[in-house]
Structures are given as C-alpha cells and as structure tokens.
Image (cartoon, grey):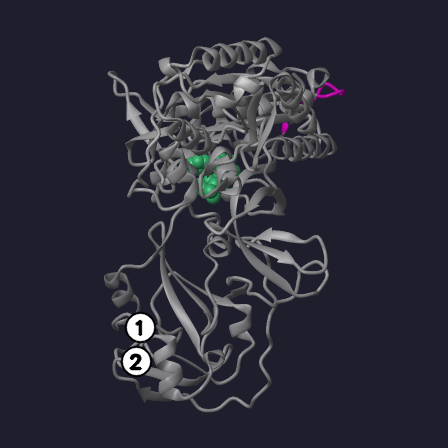
Amino acid sequence: MKMANMLVSTLREVPAEAEIDSHKLMLRAGMIRKMASGIYNYMPLGLKVLKNIEEIVRQEMNDAGAQEFLASAILPAELWQESGRWDVYGEEMFRLKDRNNREFCLGPTHEEVFTDMARNEIKSYKQLPVNLYQIQTKYRDERRPRFGIMRSREFIMKDAYSFDKDQEGLDVSFDKMNEAYVKIFNRCGINAKCVEADSGAIGGSNSAEFMVKSEVGEDDVVFCNACDYAANMEKAPSTVDKAEKEEAKELVKTETPNIRTIEELTSFFNTSAKKFAKTLIFNADGKIVAVMVRGDREVNETKVSNDLGGIAQLEMASAEDVFKATNAAIGFAGPIGIKIDELLVDEEVANMYNFIVGANETGFHLENANYGRDFEGKVGDYRNITIGEKCPACGSEITIARGTEVGHIFKLGTKYSETMKATFMDENGKDKPFVMGCYGIGVTRTMASVIEQHHDEYGITWPLALAPYHVSVIPVNIKDEEQMEIAEKLYNELRALGVDALLDNRNERAGVKFKDSELIGIPMRITVGKKIGDGEIEFKLRTKEVEVIRVEDVINKVKEEFKKNNFKL
Ligand code: ATP
Ligand code: MG
C-alpha cells in the first residue's frame, strides 16, 4: 500500500478516554474509533490485524478438524426459552422485537443455535464426532464496558461447539481444542496459561480458561509456587483456618455507636479481625441471602451464586432490604434473629469461638457468638482464597496475580442436548443426547492483550504474524528522484515476494514518517536517504538499533527475519 493514498489516522496526543496502554495505543495508532460506550469501529489498520488473528484461529481450528459455520447474530427468543436461559441471562442480553412483536436477542453466545442445528442435521452416531466453529460478532450489554475492545458490548468471538456420542469422545474433543488454543496464543505471541475455571452462566461440569498475566486484568488468578496448579479465584477452593478451641462464653451485647467497618471494630474492641464474623446481605434475583465470612475475608460471589443454583445476578441488598432483614442501619447486621431467605456460613466461621457479630440493632454488636449454639445456616466455602494459603493440589503456598481471560473451554456434557432434546441414534438404535463441548476465544480481546504485552514508549511492537504491514519503506525526501526510484523498486520487489509492504510516499518530514511507523508497530523499516548515492540504506527492526547496509542486501535481510519468525512467504 502506498501511504499517500491511505487513511492514516495517527494521533500524537493520548486520548483522555483511555486508561490502559492497549486502548491508548489503538486509538493513537488509528486502529479503532469509538461509536458509543463499548462499541467500536475498526479502522483499516486495526481491521488488518484483526484479520491476521482470525486467520491464525481459522487455520488452527481447521487443523484440529473443526469446520467453519456462520450462524445468524439475531436469534429468536423461542430457542432461548427452550433452554431456559431467556429469563436467566439477565440484563447482559440485548433484546429486541420485530414489527410483529416477536422477540429476539442479539446473540451473546450460541449454544442454543448450535444445539438446534445438531438436532436437525445429525441423525446417527456414524456422523459423530463433529466440531463446528464460527468467527462472529457477539453482543453483551456489559455492566461496565471498559478498556476499549478489552471489554466491549459488541465484540468478535470464535466459538466452537463439539458433538460426541459419549464422555470419552468429549474428552478427546476437549483436549484437541486445548492444544489448538495453545498453538493459537503462541502464534499470536502471547503467553496464555490454562487455568481451572468456573463454568458461569453457560453451565456444564468442567471448564478451563486461558489467562494472560496482566496488571490491568480483571480476573484474579491463583498460582501454586510449587506445582502446576492454576485456577481462577472464582473457582479455587479455600482452606479452613481452624481457630483454637475455647469454651463458649455468654453472649454480651455491647454498644458500638457509629462503629461499623471491620477497621473501626478492631480498634474499638482492640482485637484482630479474625475475632469477627461479618454478615453481608445480598439480593439474589429477589431472594435475600446473608453470607458470613471471617472479618478479614472476602465473599466469593461466584461460589455463593453457584450454591444458590447459578443465580445470574448477585447484588448487594439495598439499604431498605437490609433494614427489613435486620431492623438496623447498614453496618450492624448479624446472624442472630436476622430475617432473610437463607443464611450461608463460611466453614471458617463455623469453626470459630466467641466471636463478634452485628446485633441487628443500630449501634450494637454481640460478643461471644458461637455457631451451632446461637445460630445455624448452610455451611460451605463462600470466600476467596488468599495469598499464602495452601494449594488445593499439593499443599504448598499459593500466590495470586491479575489476569485477562482470552479463551474459555467447557465440557457442557448433555446440559443443552437434554433440555433441547437434541439426540442421535446410537449403535443399538437408541436415541441418545449429544455430549457437547463449547470453546470460545475473544478475538478482539486477544488483539488488545497482544498490545498489552507488545509495546514500548514509541508505540506498538507487533509480532510479525499479526502486524498490519510487515515492512515500511521510507524515502526520506520524496522530491529526490533517486531515493523515490529505489524505494519504489524495493517496495515492488518485497510485494512480489509476498511481503506486505508499505511505501511511505507522503509529503511529510522523515521524522513524522518514522514516528508513525513506530506507533503503528511495523516490525521492519527500510529508509532510503542521502546515503543511497553510495549504495547504502538503513534497515531497522522495530525494537532494535538502525543498521546501515548495502541496498542489494536488504531483501535477504527481510527474508531472514521471516525465517527467524517461522513465517513462510
Ligand atoms: P468475562 O468474565 O471476561 O466477562 P466471560 O466468561 O463472560 O468473560 P465467555 O462467555 O467465556 O466470557 O466468552 C468467551 C471469550 O469471549 C472470553 O474468554 C473473552 O475472551 C471474550 N469476551 C467475553 N466477553 C467479552 C467482552 N465483553 N468484550 C470482549 N471480549 C469478551
Ligand atoms: Mg462476561
């Protein structure tokens, strides 16, 4: 492409709306532009990168034996009502009506569609296994769209669905996808770790996420220091820190005027947070639920939600609901005499003695509460694991790091095929539900994650396989005939080899052209300047120093780079 005819929308200023590096750089390099909150247009340069990622995904999916499919993005409500998710999916689903008042949604995910397709098209075990995928636009009305295309409301996902005749078949399909994902993320130049995960609203028994370590990640990932164990914090089981046994003392009601938070309470009672149990009140789709954890712990909302049967939306209860439950202002809730639908007690709390809880009376707490004697509830693991706790696999210490989820693979089993009556005929002529798996990659989120890992103070440093263009050829002075002639010749030779080259023939200062090339992240730069009189030009790798080389050597130099990167021309 010749840049004089190209829309180059680079910005020198850092846009105020962007908080993280990838978002800033995508705006500055002119890769994306915002339409509305969480909704973006892909500019020509951004689209080229996106297509490169899609192609890697497509090749690896095809190599793993999956077939490409393209479903509609607009989906009839009936399908979702059949699976039971129309009501459960909640506010994240974009819903709409047609002129005849029929209800539809913009697909946030496609399990129903592919299950429906399988029940219509696959009749016999002889046709199995089948794995179908698509690379398509998804819609989710996220509560907090942010970080540009990292968490957007319209995004591109590669989603695949496997259909097997039995569990063993599913295990094979799942492992194949796992391997394909490792290859995809490697080829994209990002280090994504496979971690145990919660299955969320999609359901099913077994799932793993591909996480990229990142300070701007929205997930907490638990890693073991000694073994391979890694899991999303939502999933990682905590260990019970058993308190030393004490004789139960008598309950004492103590006035604690305006003392509400654990910090205020520990200094007021002059004791450690471990002597308190806090009672948090949630609204779980209309049901009022209280959860008790030790004073220094955090409630794990995923564990709570799963325990309540996978409630889609768990929210802190309103002040009004808290008052109804406790007859007190926020900050004084406790388990004794509380009026709620269900009390969940973290196992650690059930193993504490003589601890302090809210009195359900404004301005009061109770000392010497004991589980079993003073109150009872459903005991379970309802809290987040913390740094230094035991690894669930080997017992060594764990650490926690921030991560971004770029992919998610699930063993769905027969969850959808049973409810939607999607069956095939087995070897004995019997109808059996398909055993399914589903596998997603956030294609647009992967693009942002690659930039998070590949950038410097000057701009993006794309891996060769993803770069919008491989080489930029820059004549320093476009009015100099010799410089232009050689630059154009090199540009044509590179293109003939299959190299995606740019010729920066814009009437701009060389400094501007260098800056743009660096910001956009072109991996190689060839500068044709004054030294061409001596047969010399400059060659520069994006992250290395300038080399002065003979003009006749430059094509080989470029070829070598492709070879080093295992990139076939
Ligand atoms: P998250 O927890 O980040 O919301 P999820 O668990 O809802 O993700 P899945 O339903 O598993 O995501 O979707 C598969 C993949 O799609 C994710 O691994 C992620 O890469 C991508 N994805 C999900 N939501 C978004 C979004 N709002 N914007 C961009 N990519 C997304
Ligand atoms: Mg989500």
Q: Is disc 1 in contact with disc 2, using a CB cutoff of under 8 Å?
A: yes
For residue 331, the mark is 1
Q: Earlier in the sequence, mark 1 or mark 2?
A: 2
The image shows residue 411, relative to residue 569, as above or below, that is: below
Identify the image quadrant of residue 141: top left
Residue farthest along the front direction in this orientation: 534
Q: Residues within 10 Å of mark 1 (few under 14, many from 20)?
A: many
Q: Is residue 201 visible?
A: no
Residue 17 % position (x, y): 29, 42
Indicate whether 144 appears above or below 537.
below
Question: Is 429 in the magenta?
Answer: yes
Name the spot of residue 185 as percent of width and height, x first.
Answer: 61, 34
Question: Measuring 52% from the left and 21% from the top, which residue is drawn there?
Answer: 116
Q: Nearer the viewer, mark 1 or mark 2?
A: 2
- Position of 564 with respect to 529 (left or right) is right
Q: Is residue 135 above or below residue 328?
A: above
Please name the amino acid that badge 2 sits on. Ile
Q: Residues within 10 Å of mark 2 (few under 14, many from 20)?
A: some
Is 3 or 131 nearer to us in this picture?
3
Q: CA distance from mark 1 to mark 2?
A: 8 Å
Which residue in the structure is indicated by mark 2?
259
Question: Which stretch is magenta?
Answer: 426-435
The residue located at (48%, 27%) in the rendering is 110
Q: Could you say whether the residue bearing mark 1 is in a helix, strand or loop?
A: loop
